[in-house]
Amino acid sequence: MKKLLDHGILIAGVLFLLTPLYLLFVSSTHEVDTLIRDGLQWLPGSQGLAAYEKALNQSLGFSGEATGWRMLFNSLVMGLGFAIGKIIVSMAAAYAIVYFRLPLASFFFWAIFTTLLLPLEVRIIPSYAVVSDLGLLNSYTGLILPLIASATATFYFRQFYKTVPDELLEAALLDNTGPVRFFIDILVPLSRTMMAAIFIIMFVVGWNQYLWPLIMTTEESYTTIVMGLKNILSTVRDSHIPPYDVAFAMIILAMLPPVLVVIIFQKWFVKGLVESEK
Amino acid sequence: MTAQKQKLPHGITPYLFILPQLVIIAVFFFWPAAQAVHMSFMLEDPWGLASQFVGFENYALLFSDSSYGRSFIFTLVFSFLVSLISLALALLLAVKANSVLRAQKSYRVLLTWVYAVAPAVAGLGAYFIFNRQIGVLSQAFNDMGWAFNPETDPFDASFMLILVAVWKQVPVNFIFFLAGLQSIPKSLQEAAQIDCQSDSKRFFTITFPLLAPTSFFLLVINLTYAFFETFGLIDTLTQGRPAGATTTLVYKVYQDGFLGADLGSSSAQSVILMILVLVLTAIQFRFIERRVHY
């Protein structure tokens, strides 16, 4: 009896999370007329995945460049670029902090540490000015680099390096292995699981960026799918016959890749999340 | 303290390793942050051609501005409600997921995947579900006799925003609570099982105190989330409507700075937010020190 109640609560939780997206997905397979007349639908409709084809191939902006495929591609670049860039930059920085006796070590440490305190949202306008002065508006570099300026991953790798046994370093010193070799041949392979875990988290974070791409891209060819939703919103608001089906398809398309990544790499994802937030 | 790691002899190598990170944070973090502080003391003329030093005037104007005060209060209430509700729900689910034997893994996946949905995506989805023309929820509320209208009613809009923010935040809390529960030693759990028959009593006298560090840490994470990461949610769902009733502090920075082009005021707001985050972090730090003891 008690077990039944436990399962009941868990199933209620699952339904709470799942129902809204089920509803949107199922509705995306209906004709626009049906949606306008009868509202959101609970059962699959007759259109199959036609709305997805439209969302992927049709131009969704003004210039014809921002198709769903293009936006997905931009988001992919952003997610991958952010995750990989962040891992490389932070692994290297953490290595310098943990393995060397630098005269300015504690200054560096605090400088990097401070970035944890202030999210991009609170310095968004001056950040925009800097990127604009550097001529990086409407570029992948401009999309990715400013986001890397927070040090979450650096701290994560710093903690991890500290748990690496000292004997490895002693052996390397006896062998006359240089610091670069030690990093590439020993430390990087040892960090593989950590890198995978951090990669999953950072990919999702990068893919899901909204405010930053919104303010710094004005050319439609750089629209990411998450910020592209804003255009969809205004299209739906302004049109006589709102293209609800395409809008729903876009929502599903925007969330599908990160959701799949999280489900497929569940174990690494949980590890990355729990470790990196510590 | 952890033992000092043995250090490598070095020349210029470590500087090359740390350089990329330092350059990035200098250009994209310290410089903009300093700019924000600087601009908060300046007043730009309407054409943006010249600016003059005005001291704390931007701050003084903010504190006498009733819309800023309202936004402040809304942000606090919103953040606490979102944090408390999503923590409570997640804790309940985590305790149950930890105790059932069947389908534990499926529950775990099904209760965590929403983490990957961007706030902006959640907001747009909710916009349709709460939509008065096609949405099922506003329909259901109407049938229950609640004339639900988030476009004009501040309570309805806030209710909607909190519900969606909670939806988005439950999975993260669930993951941390479950990890916390699973790190409680088996022997301790068994001893508790023998000593204390009542489920709820066992939870409140043994499990919950053991989870207290996790909960406190999560509270800080959640407040930060509600402060900053709900931007996408608000921008797609309410845009601060009706009449600024759902404008959080972060959303106001964006509205005043980008849409209103009032750089001085927007920068002063940024600086106030920085101070708020510093306070939150200081609290978190004190707690982390305690946790090491524990």
Image (cartoon, helix red, strand yellow):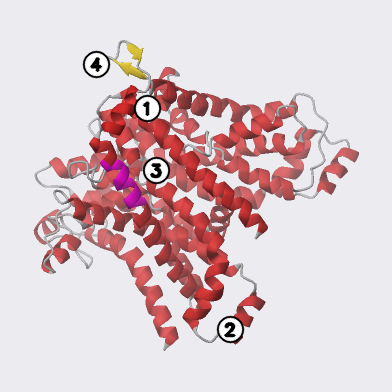
Alpha carbon distance from label 2 to label 1: 56 Å
Q: Amino acid at mark 3?
A: Phe
| Residue at image mark 1 | B267
As displayed, is residue A191 above or below residue B100?
Answer: above
Q: Amino acid at mark 2?
A: Gln
Helix or strand or loop: what does disc 1 sit on? helix
Disc with the residue nearer the chain's start (1 vs 3) = 3
* Mark found first going from the N terminus, 2 or 1: 2
The location of residue A126, given as percent across then percent down, is: 41, 25
Sequence-first tag of 4 and 3: 4
Horizontal side of residue B267 vs B33, given as left or right: left
Label 4 – label 1 distance at C-alpha: 16 Å
Tag 4 residue: B46
Chain ID at mark 4: B
* Residue at 52 percent of width and 44 percent of height: B281
The secondary structure type at the circle numbered 4 is loop
Tell which tag, 1 or 3, sits nearer the viewer: 1
Judge the density around disc 4: few (<14), some (14-19), many (≥20) Cα neighbours within 10 Å.
few
Query: Magenta region: which residues?
Result: B70-79
Magenta stretch: residue B42 in it?
no
CA gap, disc 4 to disc 2? 70 Å
Q: Where the N terminus of chain A falls, by quadrant? A: bottom left
Q: Residue flagged by tag 4: what amino acid is it? A: Pro
Q: Which mark is residue A38?
A: none
The three-letter amino acid code for the residue at tag 1 is Ser
Task: Give the alpha-carbon distance from disc 4 to disc 3, as whole Å.
Answer: 29 Å
Residue underneath mark 3 = B228
Residue at the spot of label 2: B193
Q: Are marks 4 and 3 in contact (CB under 8 Å)?
A: no
Tell me if B255 is positioned left or right of A122 in this view. left
